[in-house]
Image (cartoon, rainbow, N blue to C red):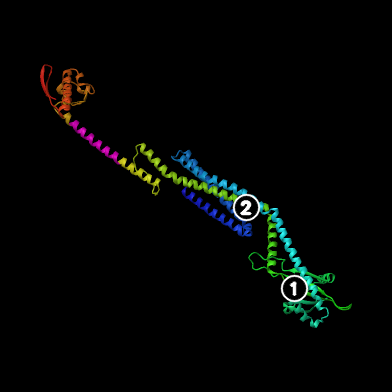
């Protein structure tokens, strides 16, 4: 039984540590926790079921001991119940408080103000990016006039000057057929730079300039490194001087990198809003997940508390049961050596002291029995000697009652003294005067002993029976 309880306590400790580890990991790596939650929850439920079976088996053992009337069963059950209440009641209180806290905390995650703040931050980021795009488009439209009278062969120098003027990373000049005329910046070293689409060129002809942001479509994974390089690409129509209808239009394309701080903040707001929306959709699932984990933790804690209560109750009750069984044996007269616990606590010392006391009582009883045997042997020897004496011997008490006689006294006094044991000597027929004389001598001796300290006396007198005078010392 102790082995089973030890294994159960070890399992409870191990599962508790695993649950605490998983809860800690859930704070830092929610995706991993949600991915393996169902599997882990099922394993924990199986372990909880095994612990329930262990508890049922322990309860069955305790009830069977109680029904069989084994000594100490009620004490063991009482101690186990006390320890279980000490563990279960605080655990239930903590569970109720934690349940309320978890439920209300999850609701507070989706507060209206939080959602409004995220929407406002997302709108602010979009407005900032749109403002940057419009500003770059306006700058591209304003500098496109510098290329109006420049031939294609000299456009490269003008593009380099425009790139330096705007702080752009690339400046390219395209024909109406999306053919590259000239370029400045990193695009000069590209064999096939990205061309504007026909739809973009049509929009440029209608609006004179367009701009769009690239590089913010896909946010990097958390911890994947620095944010991507986002750019603003603006395309502006290069106006030809005069009214030449057969001249092919040209388009100026400017690429400017966005500030890293703006990109990082925009991506952070976008990621936070996306995660918030995901959690808002899975709000009920989150509540069930956390409350389920909390409930399972409570069950495991309760089962562990009950198992530990039975284990500790058994450890505490064992010395008491040993003592109680020893007391019952001593009360029944059984002074055999009792069991001794080797523990170093006070209860173990008490069992050892009780065993020493029992051994001392056994030794004392043996000495008394030995002394009584010797006394009985001496009495029997004395009785044998008295029975073989020819002289008569009568033993009287202080009141003159006959305690014992020998056959010699019956023969000398010619009276069946053995039949009058327990009666006064003066009441024996024919010995009234003799009995009174003996009693008088006893009384005088008591007076003399008080006055002179005598320790014995001796007196001779004559008895007359059947006309014959007999003399006998008493």
Determine which residue is flagged by label 2: 290
Picture quadrant of residue 466: top left
Q: Which mark is residue 255?
A: 1
Instruction: Locate the C terminus and report the quarter of the image it occupies.
Output: top left
Q: Relative to 468, is 223 above or below?
A: below
Residue stretch in magenta: 363-384
In screen coordinates, is 19 left or right of 139?
Answer: left
Tally the marks: 2
In screen coordinates, is 225 left or right of 421?
Answer: right
In depth, the one of 232 and 50 nearer the eye is: 232
Residue 142 makes an appearance in the image:
yes
Residue 60 image point, x, y percent: 51, 43
Q: Relative to 2, is 28 above or below?
A: below
Residue 281 makes an appearance in the image:
no
Residue 344 image point, x, y percent: 39, 49
Q: Residue at x 77, y 78 (%)?
A: 159
Q: Residues within 10 Å of mark 2 (few under 14, many from 20)?
A: some
Residue occupying the far bottom of the picture: 153
In depth, the one of 375 and 209 nearer the eye is: 209
Residue 194 image point, x, y percent: 76, 74
Picture quadrant of residue 264: bottom right
Q: Is residue 366 magenta?
A: yes
Residue 405 image point, x, y percent: 19, 26
Q: Which mark is residue 165?
A: none
N-terminal-most mark, 1 or 2: 1
Q: Residue at x 52, y 49 (%)?
A: 304
In screen coordinates, is 73 left or right of 174?
Answer: left
């Amino acid at each position: 039984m102790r082995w089973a309880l030890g294994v159960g306590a070890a399992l409870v400790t191990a599962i508790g540590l695993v649950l605490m580890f998983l809860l800690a990991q859930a704070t830092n790596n929610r995706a991993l926790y949600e991915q393996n939650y169902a599997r882990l929850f099922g394993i924990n439920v199986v372990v909880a079921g095994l612990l329930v079976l262990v508890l049922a088996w322990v309860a069955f053992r305790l009830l069977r001991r109680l029904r069989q009337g084994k000594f100490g069963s009620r004490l063991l059950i009482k101690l186990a119940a006390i320890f279980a209440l000490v563990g279960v009641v605080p655990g239930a209180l903590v569970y109720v408080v934690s349940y309320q806290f978890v439920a209300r905390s999850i609701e507070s995650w989706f507060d209206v103000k939080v959602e409004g703040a995220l929407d406002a931050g997302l709108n602010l980021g979009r407005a900032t990016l749109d403002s940057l795009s419009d500003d770059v488009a306006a700058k591209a439209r304003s500098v496109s006039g510098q290329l109006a009278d420049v031939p294609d062969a000299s456009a490269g120098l003008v593009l380099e000057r425009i790139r330096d003027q705007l702080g752009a990373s690339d400046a390219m000049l395209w024909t109406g057929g999306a053919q590259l005329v000239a370029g400045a910046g990193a695009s000069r070293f590209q064999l096939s730079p990205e061309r504007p689409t026909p739809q973009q060129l049509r929009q440029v002809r209608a609006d004179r300039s367009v701009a769009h942001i690239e590089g913010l479509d896909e946010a990097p994974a958390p911890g994947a490194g620095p944010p991507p390089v986002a750019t603003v690409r603006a395309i502006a129509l290069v106006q030809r001087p005069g009214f030449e209808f057969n001249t092919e239009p040209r388009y100026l394309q400017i690429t400017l990198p966005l500030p890293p701080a703006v990109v990082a903040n925009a991506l952070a707001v976008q990621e936070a809003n996306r995660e918030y929306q995901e959690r808002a959709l899975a709000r009920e699932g989150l509540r069930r997940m956390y409350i389920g984990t909390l409930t399972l933790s409570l069950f495991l804690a309760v089962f562990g508390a009950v198992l530990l209560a039975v284990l500790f109750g058994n450890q505490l009750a064992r010395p008491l049961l040993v003592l109680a069984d020893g007391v019952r044996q001593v009360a029944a007269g059984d002074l055999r050596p009792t069991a001794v616990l080797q523990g170093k606590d006070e209860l173990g010392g008490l069992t050892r002291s009780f065993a020493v006391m029992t051994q001392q009582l056994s030794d004392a009883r043996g000495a008394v029995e030995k002394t009584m045997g010797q006394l009985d042997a001496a009495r029997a020897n004395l009785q044998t000697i008295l029975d073989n004496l020819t002289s008569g011997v009568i033993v009287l008490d202080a009141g003159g009652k006959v305690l014992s006689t020998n056959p010699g006294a019956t023969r000398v006094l010619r009276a069946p003294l053995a039949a009058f044991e327990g009666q006064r000597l003066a009441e024996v027929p024919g010995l009234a005067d003799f009995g009174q004389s003996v009693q008088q001598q006893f009384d005088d001796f008591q007076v003399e002993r008080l006055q002179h300290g005598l320790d014995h006396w001796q007196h001779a007198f004559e008895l007359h029976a059947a006309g014959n005078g007999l003399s006998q010392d008493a």
